[in-house]
């Protein structure tokens, strides 16, 4: 399969997304997406302005982890923030008016990045707390218990779908965990409105969800399904400049969204994931209202 597949798709013809200068960086393509291999600082400038509906970014967290020879995860604080601002500038530029950007990172970094997005004219929508233990307890500090997912839009959101989640059930007794102030009978049978605290995301460790070749962390498909379903319509274009294990691209393929991906290291894990049906998505009982 080559990138010629995409040229047969009407949506790409009507809305050219990238400059042909980077065509030789295409590592893989499907009828819905393009995966570029290379440094985002050299690729993002060639993505056309106002062509992307949603950006999802999950950059390295600057925790001195080893991702590969081309990834520097041990920068000074100032250097890391400066690096983030550079790729954020391009992400803002490529977003269509009304488009959304989500940045998944540690609260330490997302505090500063949120302020930068506000200064850049973006509209703050939500700080989403994804409740997953980060590490072991740290002496003299509260136990870190959540990652942050910040959500901004370029002006008034063009798409915002209501997502409902099932009423939480006790795994021991099977009863509902809340009484909802005595108004249970008035609850929508399709579930409760999605909140900005996500307690139902589990770490990705089991081999049915994670490739044996993947040693680094991997995001749950449940996170990306919510991001994509919340902020896009079918055939919209999602950009994820930090490919990692390819979770975003896998979700876009299944939800009929177009996607642009980038990865500085080897793309083999991502390509393998997109070519096989062995890795399962996490179970989701979310209900998305049209």
Image: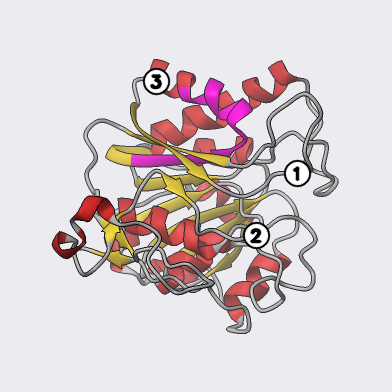
Which of the marked residues, 2 or 1, is nearer the chain's N terminus?
A: 1
The magenta span reads: 100-114
Query: Which residue in the protein does label 2 denote?
Result: 203
What's the mark number on residue 118? Answer: 3
Tell me where residue 86 sits by quadrant.
top right
Residue located 72% across and 76% down the image: 207
Tally of numbered tags = 3
Which of the marked residues, 1 or 3, is nearer the chain's N terminus?
A: 3
Classify mark 2: helix, strand or loop. loop
Give the mark toward the camera: 3 or 2. Answer: 2
Tell me where residue 95 sits by quadrant.
top left
Residue 69 visible in the picture: yes
**Quadrant occupied by the C terminus:** bottom left
Residue located 64% across and 70% down the image: 271
In this picture, residue 144 sits left or right of residue 157: right
Q: Is residue 260 highlighted in magenta? A: no
Q: Where is residue 57 in the image (x, y as percent from the top left)?
A: 53, 43
Q: Nearer the viewer, residue 127 or 138?
A: 138
Within 10 angstroms of label 2, few (less than 14), some, or many (20 or more) residues? few
Within 10 angstroms of label 1, few (less than 14), some, or many (20 or more) residues? few
Residue located 58% across and 45% down the image: 58
What's the mark number on residue 135? Answer: 1
Distance, label 2 to label 1, CA atoms, is 12 Å
In this picture, residue 215 sits left or right of residue 41: right
Q: Position of residue 128 (x, y in %)?
A: 45, 41
Classify mark 3: helix, strand or loop. helix
Contact (Cβ within 8 Å) of mark 3 with mark 2: no
Classify mark 1: helix, strand or loop. loop
Q: Is residue 109 highlighted in magenta? A: yes
Distance, label 3 to label 2, CA atoms, is 31 Å
Q: Which of 21 and 231 is in front in this view?
A: 231
């Amino acid at each position: 399969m080559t990138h010629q597949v995409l040229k047969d798709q009407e949506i790409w013809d009507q809305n050219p997304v990238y400059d042909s200068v980077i065509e030789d960086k295409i590592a893989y393509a499907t009828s819905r997406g393009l995966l570029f291999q290379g440094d985002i600082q050299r690729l993002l400038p060639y993505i056309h302005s106002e062509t992307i509906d949603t950006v999802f970014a999950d950059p390295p967290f600057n925790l001195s982890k080893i991702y590969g020879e081309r990834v520097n995860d041990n920068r000074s604080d100032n250097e890391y923030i400066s690096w983030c601002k550079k790729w954020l500038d391009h992400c803002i530029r490529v977003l269509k008016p009304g488009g959304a950007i989500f940045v998944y990172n540690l609260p330490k970094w997302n505090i500063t990045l949120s302020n930068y997005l506000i200064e850049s004219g973006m509209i703050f929508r939500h700080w989403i707390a994804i409740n997953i233990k980060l590490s072991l307890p740290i002496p003299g500090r509260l136990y870190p218990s959540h990652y942050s997912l910040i959500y901004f839009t370029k002006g008034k959101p063009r798409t915002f779908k209501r997502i409902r989640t099932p009423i939480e059930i006790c795994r021991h007794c099977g009863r509902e965990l809340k009484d909802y102030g005595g108004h249970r009978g008035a609850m929508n049978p399709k579930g409760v409105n999605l909140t900005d605290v996500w307690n139902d995301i589990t770490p990705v460790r089991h081999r049915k969800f994670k490739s044996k070749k993947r040693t680094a962390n991997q995001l749950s498909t449940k996170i990306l399904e919510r991001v994509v379903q919340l902020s896009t319509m079918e055939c919209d274009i999602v950009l994820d400049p930090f490919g990692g294990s390819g979770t975003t691209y896998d979700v876009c393929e299944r939800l009929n969204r177009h996607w642009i991906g980038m990865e500085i290291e080897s793309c083999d894990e991502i390509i393998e994931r997109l070519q096989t049906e062995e890795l399962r998505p996490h179970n989701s009982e979310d209900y998305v209202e049209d």
